[in-house]
Image: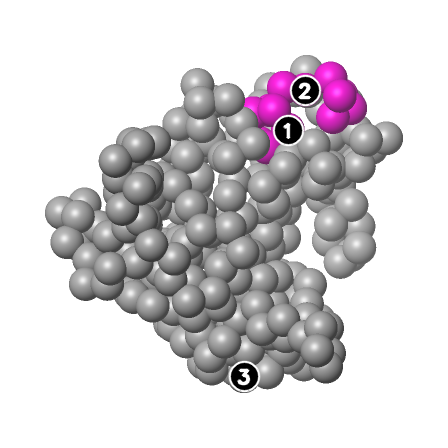
Amino acid sequence: MITVCDLAVTFGSGRDAVQAVRGVSFEVAPGESFGLVGESGSGKSTVLRVLAGLNRRWDGVAQLAGLNVATGDRRLPKVVQMVFQDPYASLHPRHTVDRALSEPLEIHGIGDVSDRVVRAMEAVGLGPSFRFRFPNQLSGGQRQRVAIARALMLEPQVLLLDEPTSALDVSVQAEILNLLRGLREAQGLTMILVSHNLAVVAHMCDRLAVMNHGLVVEDMDVDTLRREAPREAYTRQLLLASRGYDREAAARMVTFD
């Protein structure tokens, strides 16, 4: 379903050039949930933005369901959609839920708009009373449910998730993660989840790749992650950091170039 080969992304030029992604390669099977983990600035979200067609300047190969992302094929929005980290920033503050969900259908000339909006809201656990509310009238979790519903309006095969719960209260995070798992099973979705939270990845994914400074330094299945048996020292340090702050452990940590 997803093929990425030797993906490279550079921002800026000359002395100011920054290699955000360097030769990243991976494949994701249909219906699989794949994780990209690493610390901030490792290149995870940049990979997602390439696959979503939001970054057009890159080298390498990126294909979704056999479509070449580089061509800007008009069929791509019906294959892949993305859910962003901040559900408030990703929703237009002056657009109601109804308009946010209707707009993708209208852009692509898809009919039966009203019924599709109602079904999408039901799928993410929002009742009819939310349909004509504005984002500022919703909680963080409700806003993220709207963002997920919007991403599903065109019935994509691939869902890209960029830290979908990191901006939410801890009490709401599990609800959103369980919603995403249920949608994946019900709709046969293929997912890529970007996160720095290894517990979230262990809950959501089948396999994962660990990124550092734009490179994939290790790939593993989720059972290896749960056993805390990674091959690379960087991944072991990432696991240690995920347990919370420990003064002695922090003193032993090293910087990986």
Q: Quadrant of residue 32?
A: bottom left
Separation of disc 1 and disc 3 at Cα?
A: 35 Å
At a point 53% along the width and 71% down the height, the residue shown is 21
Give the crowd class for mark 2: few <14, some 14-19, many >=20 residues within 10 Å.
some
Check contact, mark 1 vs mark 3: CB within 8 A: no
Inspect the image, locate mark 1, and give the three-letter code of the amino acid beneath it.
Arg
Residue 141 among magenta residues: yes
Judge by depth and name the residue closer to the eye, 115 or 13: 13
The colouring scheme, among rainbow, by chain, secondary structure or one colour, is one colour
Q: Which residue is mark 3?
A: 60
Check contact, mark 2 vs mark 1: CB within 8 A: yes
Horizontal and vertical percent position of residue 232: 23, 63
Asked if residue 39 lies left or right of residue 224, the reply is: right
Horizontal and vertical percent position of residue 158: 50, 58
Q: Which numbered disc covers residue 138?
A: 2
Q: Which residue is mark 1?
A: 143
Residue 167's place in the image compared with 225, above or below, is above
Disc on the earlier residue, 1 or 3: 3
Asked if residue 126 lies left or right of residue 108, the reply is: left
Q: Secondary structure at mark 2?
A: loop
Q: Residue furthest right?
A: 94
Tally of numbered tags: 3
At a point 45% along the width and 74% down the height, the residue shown is 24
Residue 42's place in the image compared with 128, above or below, is below
Instruction: Tell me where the magenta segment starts and ends, as one range.
Output: 133-145
